[in-house]
Image (spheres, grey):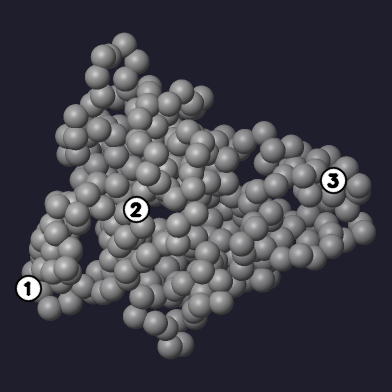
């Protein structure tokens, strides 16, 4: 597996706005504009933690993450059969309920079919060719491999730009459901911090409280946790509303509350479950094998009509099974 090469820097010294591909070509003269555009097309460039297009605009203070890792040589983005739960579809967008375990887009070491390849297969049914560059589905936002829930995919470049702008400006609606390994003190807790790569663990982000010194690469993040139920004086079911959408935001903020998402292999903790929890519940919890985090609700303006749309994805079976066992065994505080 190839080591990731990542460039992170803050945009500065420009007047107004500038296209991201032109800006990168100017500040990285050792790289050709053709290569920069290829990296952007391959979803290897993030602007303020969101994927961008070559035509996306940057301004002073924006943060760019540029991955220089080359794609796996024998992996070509192409249609692949995949069971996709489509919640809504029209000429501009596809809204899906992504299953846990599905990777959104191929990356280094990805071997299994991905969501974007499944979407390509879905769009290519009954056609003899693949969509052209302007009509190719585009990922606007991502969910981690083991996070389930609702996502929107743009069917063409114009729709992608409209949706990406909404995600950048934080005008859309995103709400998650999570089972936390810990008990929250209050019914509602707002977490505001700066998130930055943890120097001790490259795969993890560190939540740095506002007012404390943070690296230039750190980004402001805000999450609102609402407590719904507590089970066995140990587990808390919460709704989480996002005011920003940073990488690993909920997972990092939950850890900062000393209540990581249950089953999280990166942010979780190794701590025995309390004896008061019955055996069947313990076995089910330990068998989950992923973080119990689900994107329940997504709202946005339709890129063509401007109409406000809202979609909800039901909890997957493993999450529902755990909650049902907890409730049936009377472990609600």
Cα distance, mark 1 to mark 3?
59 Å
- Graded by Cα atoms within 10 Å as few (under 14), some (14 to 19) or many (20 or more), the crowding at tag 3 reads few
Q: Which mark is residue 15?
A: 1
Where does label 3 land, which residue?
A: 283
Mark 2 is surrounded, within 10 Å at the Cα level, by few (under 14), some (14 to 19) or many (20 or more) other residues, namely: some
| Residue 108 image point, x, y percent | 44, 50
Rendered location of residue 18, percent (x, y): 10, 63
Mark 1 or mark 2: whose residue is earlier in sequence:
1
Element under label 2? loop
CA distance separating discs 3 and 2: 41 Å
Visible residue check, residue 166: no
What's the distance in space between the residues labelled 1 and 2, CA to CA? 32 Å
Q: Residue at x 21, y 45 (%)?
A: 162
Question: Is 239 in front, or is 200?
Answer: 200
Q: In the image shown, does 124 or 222 lie closer to the viewer?
A: 124
Image point 92% across, 59% down: which residue?
A: 275
- Helix, strand or loop at label 1? It is loop
According to the picture, the residue beneath numbered tag 2 turns out to be 70
User: Considering depth in this image, is 38 or 45 the residue closer to the camera?
Assistant: 38
């Amino acid at each position: 597996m190839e080591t990731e090469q990542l460039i992170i820097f803050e945009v500065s010294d420009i007047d107004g706005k500038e296209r991201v591909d032109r800006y990168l070509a100017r500040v990285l003269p050792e790289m050709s504009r053709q290569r920069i555009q290829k990296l952007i097309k391959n979803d290897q460039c993030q602007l303020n933690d969101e994927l961008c297009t070559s035509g996306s605009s940057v301004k002073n203070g924006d943060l760019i993450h540029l991955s220089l890792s080359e794609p796996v040589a024998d992996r070509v983005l192409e249609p692949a059969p995949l069971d996709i739960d489509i919640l809504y579809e029209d000429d501009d967008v596809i809204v899906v309920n992504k299953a846990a375990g599905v990777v959104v887009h191929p990356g280094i070491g990805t071997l299994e079919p991905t969501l974007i390849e499944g979407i390509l297969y879905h769009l290519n049914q009954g056609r003899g060719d693949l969509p052209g560059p302007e009509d190719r589905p585009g990922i606007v936002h991502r969910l981690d491999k083991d996070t389930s829930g609702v996502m929107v995919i743009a069917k063409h470049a114009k729709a992608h730009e409209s949706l990406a702008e909404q995600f950048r400006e934080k005008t859309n609606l995103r709400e998650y459901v999570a089972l936390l390994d810990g008990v929250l003190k209050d019914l509602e807790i707002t977490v505001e911090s700066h998130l930055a790569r943890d120097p001790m663990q490259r795969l993890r982000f560190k939540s740095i409280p506002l007012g404390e010194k943070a690296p230039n690469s750190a980004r402001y993040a805000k999450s609102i946790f609402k407590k719904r139920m507590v089970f066995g004086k140990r587990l808390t079911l919460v709704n989480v509303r996002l005011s920003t959408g940073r990488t690993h935001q909920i997972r990092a903020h939950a850890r900062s509350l000393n209540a990581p998402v249950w089953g999280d292999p990166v942010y979780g903790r190794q701590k025995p479950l309390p004896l008061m929890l019955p055996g069947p519940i313990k076995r089910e919890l330990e068998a989950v094998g992923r973080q119990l985090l689900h994107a329940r609700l997504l709202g946005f303006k339709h890129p063509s009509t401007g109409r406000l749309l809202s979609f909800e994805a039901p909890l997957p079976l493993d999450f529902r099974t755990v909650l049902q066992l907890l409730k049936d065994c009377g472990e609600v505080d």
